[in-house]
Amino acid sequence: MPIYDYTCKKCGQTFELLVMSSTIPACPRCGGRELQKLISAPTAPGKSAGIMAAGRVRAAKEGHTINYKHSNGKIVD
């Protein structure tokens, strides 16, 4: 279920909704059904612990010897 941004043509409210394909969205303020779907800017992917760990493993396999260890905030060899 994607999240869409809408503007209500009746009251002017701008809001986000998690919408299933079979659902007809309504404005949370006035209940209006005349909505304009807005174009949303994509967000950059976040950095998760899994991505960082995989990067360290890949760097070690490539022979890089300097790694940043998050637990103590220091660069270790």
Image (cartoon, helix red, strand yellow):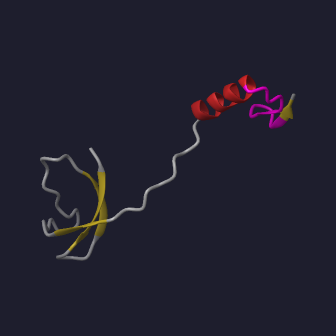
Q: Is residue 51 magenta?
A: no
The N terminus - image quarter: top left
Please state if 46 lies on the left or on the right of 53 as rendered.
left
Examine the rendered structure and indicate whether residue 46 appears above or below residue 57: below
Closer to the camera, 29 or 46? 46
Examine the rendered structure and indicate whether residue 42 appears above or below residue 39: above
Residue 39 image offset from top left, x and y in percent: 33, 65
> Residue placed at 37% from the left, 62% from the top?
40
> Residue placed at 19% from the left, 68% from the top?
35
Please state if 11 lies on the left or on the right of 62 as rendered.
left
Examine the rendered structure and indicate whether residue 4 appears above or below residue 20: below
For the magenta stretch, what is the residue range? Answer: 62-74
Please state if 44 lies on the left or on the right of 11 as rendered.
right
Q: Is residue 67 magenta?
A: yes
> Residue placed at 83% from the left, 28% from the top?
65
> Residue placed at 29% from the left, 57% from the top?
4
